[in-house]
Amino acid sequence: MTRIVIVGAGPAGIAAADALSAAPVEVTLIDEAARPGGQLYRSPAPGLKLDMSRLLGSSHGAYAAFHDKAAGLCRRLDYRPGTLVWSIHGGAVHLASASGAAALPYDALILATGATDRIMPAPGWTLPGVFTLGGAQALLKDQGVAIGRRVVFCGSSPLLYLAASQYLRMGVKVAAVIDSTPFAAKLRALPDMARAPATLAAGLRAMAELRLGGVPIHQGARIERFEGEERLAAVQCRAGAGQLVRIACDAAAYGHGLRPEAQLAELAGCELRYDPVQRLHLPVIDGDGRAGERLYIAGDGGHIGGGQAASLSGALAAAALLDDLGLPASDVDRAGSRRSLARLRGFPNGIAAAFRWPREQVVALADDTILCRCENIRVGEVRAALRQPMASPDANRIKAVSRCGMGRCQGRFCGPALAELVGAGHAGELDRLRAQAPIKPLPIALAGEAAP
Ligand SMILES: Cc1cc2nc3c(=O)[nH]c(=O)nc-3n(C[C@H](O)[C@H](O)[C@H](O)COP(=O)(O)OP(=O)(O)OC[C@H]3O[C@@H](n4cnc5c(N)ncnc54)[C@H](O)[C@@H]3O)c2cc1C
């Protein structure tokens, strides 16, 4: 029977699995996480009594409905939790899990790998106590653990407000929200953001909750440094009017929006194109998620668009796959889903404008700021590499010369800032680091076993 592999059991992967569930195909659903849910519907570890309806507020209904559906599907499918896809080559996904390494051949592949935080390096951002925004949220949803007792949420992202409101609801002191985008920029982006009214409403509700809870919100403020000796003690920012503000805290959740996890797509042969609004490279896919020969991409891994867009695109990708295989069509409403998706896809442009990636800050970073935290490479070392005579100082060449992006995260976190540094002074398209396997760290015991 035709074997379909779906990577990712978030909203997109589960919607794809659901649309394939009545088709005469064998579906394997793989996720490195222990439970389905992805980022949006991440659920607590079994046995942990975490009040998810308090944590999620008005979005708890959608969370419960997702988990009802996912539980039924995962029982019926070949569902493999706790399994990392670390490479794709030779028509197979290459897996690593607690039970060892394996290669799983596929006839068609749906990648629903989601997104991850985009981060701007800043002085002190490697101090203990500074977390990515997504990491701070994942700890709360997954383990019921807050990153600190007095937490600052900072950077530039709608998730700042969502995550801060979740912390507040769970009784954690939110010391401040520091958002580098001015309020006026958000107002200008309202028409695009209104294309996803439910997501916009959730963001506005979170902002209102924070204000009612007495949380100071600094908009249009620039992070100057994370301050502390052994660990974080305060965040310093330059507020809108230019004055220096110091906020004492024991933890900070820091992020500048999201970037698609597109490394597997690239290894599977998908082309990437540069998006000048988001200043990111995104997979080239058609309206239904086709990305190459028997390759489909759904959800945030293709277009950052939120949970609703992820579900619609998962179902559409599955329907496209069945059409391409000449198998009986699923009952996905293709025309309706395409219309809704086209509307929702205006949203990321609104978000990119409303919550700007402050690229000018990279160019202004001091030489001693750490850029690549895995290899401990400072901005000055990358600038020195850029001054070396070379035919084309692209990001991959600079990586080879400086080791920036060569560590555990494979440039997933320092890559966007490195690209800005390499591109400083050049107009037009930014460069990017090429994807390389293993895309995420492998346990050393498996590395030998997994070698092709
Ligand atoms: C950190 C973070 C927090 C977010 N919080 C919110 C929020 O509070 N509210 C909101 O509306 N939106 C939030 N979003 C956005 C929202 O999660 C997404 O729009 C939506 O979940 C996208 O669904 P998806 O199925 O495309 O991806 P995801 O939900 O991200 O699911 C992707 C899945 O793929 C798996 N995966 C990825 N790579 C591999 C691999 N190599 N091998 C095996 N498995 C893999 C991951 O473990 C994950 O379970 C958040 C996004 C992120 C990144």
Image: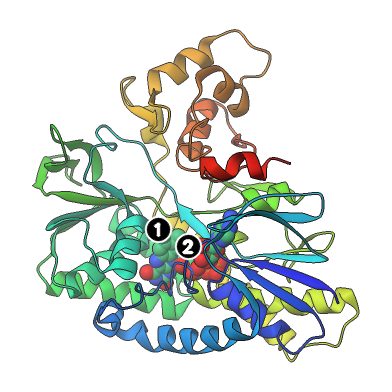
Q: Give above or below for 358 relative to 299.
A: above
* Number of callouts: 2
Quadrant of the rendered image containing residue 126: top left
- Measuring from the top left, give residue 331's x and y in whole percent: 74, 92
Rendering quarter of residue 152: bottom left
Residue 366's place in the image compared with 447, above or below, is above
- For label 1, the crowd category at 10 Å Cα-Cα, with few meaning under 14, some 14 to 19 and many 20 or more, is many
Residue 354 visible in rendering: yes
Q: What residue did someone put label 2 on?
A: 350
Residue 201 falls in which quadrant of the image? bottom left
Element under disc 2: helix
> For this view, does 262 lie left or right of residue 245?
right
Residue 204 or 104: which is nearer the viewer?
Answer: 104
The amino acid on which the numbered mark 2 sits, given as a three-letter code, is Gly
Q: Is mark 1 within 8 Å of ligand 1?
A: no
Report the quarter where the N terminus lies. Answer: bottom right
Q: Give me the disc on residue 354.
A: 1
Task: Identify the image quadrant of the C terminus.
Answer: top right
Looking at numbered disc 1 in the image, what kind of residue is underneath it? Ala
Report if the CB atoms under discs 2 and 1 are less than 8 Å apart.
Answer: yes
Q: Which residue is drawn at 41% across and 71% down?
A: 42
